[in-house]
Amino acid sequence: MRRAYARPMTSPTTQADDVRDTLDVGALRHPDSMKWTLYPPDVIPMWVADMDYPVAPAILDALRERLTRGLGYHQLRGDPELLPLLRAHLAAQGLDDLPEGGIAFLPGVVPGLYAAVHALTTPGEPVVTMTPIYHPFHMAITDLGRRVAGVPLREGETGYEINWAALDAASRGSRLLMLCHPHNPTGRVWTAEELEKLRDLAIARDLFVVSDELHADLRYTGSAFEAFAADPRVRSRTITLTGPCKAYNTAGLGIGAMVGHNAGLVSRVRSAAGGLMGHEGAMSVTMWRAALSGAGPWLEDTVAYLQTNRDFLMAYLREKLPWVRAYAPEATYLAWLDLRDHPRAGDIQAFLLNEAKVAVHDGPVFAPEAQKAQYQGFVRLNFATSRAILTEALDRMATALNSAR
Ligand SMILES: Cc1ncc(COP(=O)(O)O)c(C=O)c1O
């Protein structure tokens, strides 16, 4: 059934005929979409981190053209066009002067998380994370028989911040800090001051650092992105993970990269996965190349649209759901909402699914086993959709939540 949550809508910073404003729910709910088919058709999916927007025309054109050239093995030693594009992209984030062997391609970022835990720690050891955090961080740690040393972020005056004393205490017995920068699910972009303190800590406690910077290009902060390893002091101990799938909405074409100034460390981590990891796909390489060479304007428009959605969401919460605690994410299209003041906080995800017909991610998903109860009552909401669909979802949530209070 073709159904658009139609509500003509234009936003001040985007074109009146912006394709992001006129999404067709019937088209979005195609059988290949996990996001749109996991739940029944009357549910609006605001969970997994896919955007509802069409892929950039520059990427689609490149993929079509690639199909005319066969699908044999591509440049498995590093695509000669993608490598320089990626090097320039990383240099703009402070990761300049990467050595030969400083970039290893992966079939995705998550395999890099697993490889790092496998290579840099031994079973039984604690690995430090800042919770809540994107759940595969904890899965990589526990699936490989390590222990999560999860340090909860604390709520400061303007948003979530690092609990330095707790982080330092957790780091004492560990060899690896797994950083998410920008941070999923809170949307924090660690500031220059925070990054300096994190680097000091990594040096003082002699930690390896894996910095997942997959959301770096989806920022609303305006200033240039500063990678954790932008500072030469921590380069020899850091692996940065990156990829195109969040910024360009291409998660179905898995690819990522493991980046480091210490080529020996990159090789050690990549080798830990050996042949188990497989290689990145040819179409993925073409996609990333096209993204970096031709989809910049698309990305700029997308971030502008997301920013208006984010601002709309925050204004909506202030007006209609003022008891919900939330801070505007500085990056990502994910909002971390604290609904613990609601009487149904104990089963809030199921409540929203059944009563509002809106599917969000449940807070405890982002916590290690020992902290699940602490994040009950939180949800993560994906606002990368049209304004009309976002409005419909928020209206449904507000009606259900406020009538049960
Ligand atoms: C922080 C972070 N890392 C990694 C991933 C997944 O990366 P990939 O699909 O390349 O494995 C996500 C997906 O949402 C993410 O948010």
Image (cartoon, rainbow, N blue to C red):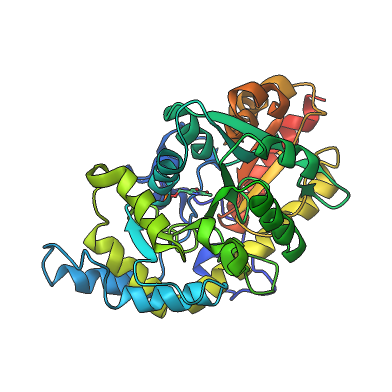
Q: Is residue 108 visible?
A: yes
Give the vertical position of 293 relative to 253 (above or below): below
Q: Quadrant of the N terminus?
A: top left
Residue at image coords 59%, 23%: 369
Q: Quadrant of the C terminus?
A: top right
Q: Is residue 22 visible?
A: no
| Left or right: where 71 falls relative to 56 | left
Residue at image coords 53%, 34%: 138
- Where does residue 125 sit, x and y in percent of width and height? 53, 30
How many numbered marks have been drawn onto this rendered protein structure? 0
Closest to the observer: 168 or 250? 168
Residue at image coords 43%, 58%: 245
- Residue 273 image-quadrant placement: top left
- Where does residue 130 sit, x and y in percent of width and height? 66, 41
- Residue 398 image-quadrant placement: top right
- Residue 404 image-quadrant placement: top right
Closest to the observer: 196 or 131? 196
Closest to the observer: 45 or 201? 201
- Where does residue 319 sit, x and y in percent of width and height? 84, 48
| Left or right: where 205 falls relative to 82 | right
- Where does residue 390 sit, x and y in percent of width and height? 62, 50
Residue at image coords 73%, 36%: 169
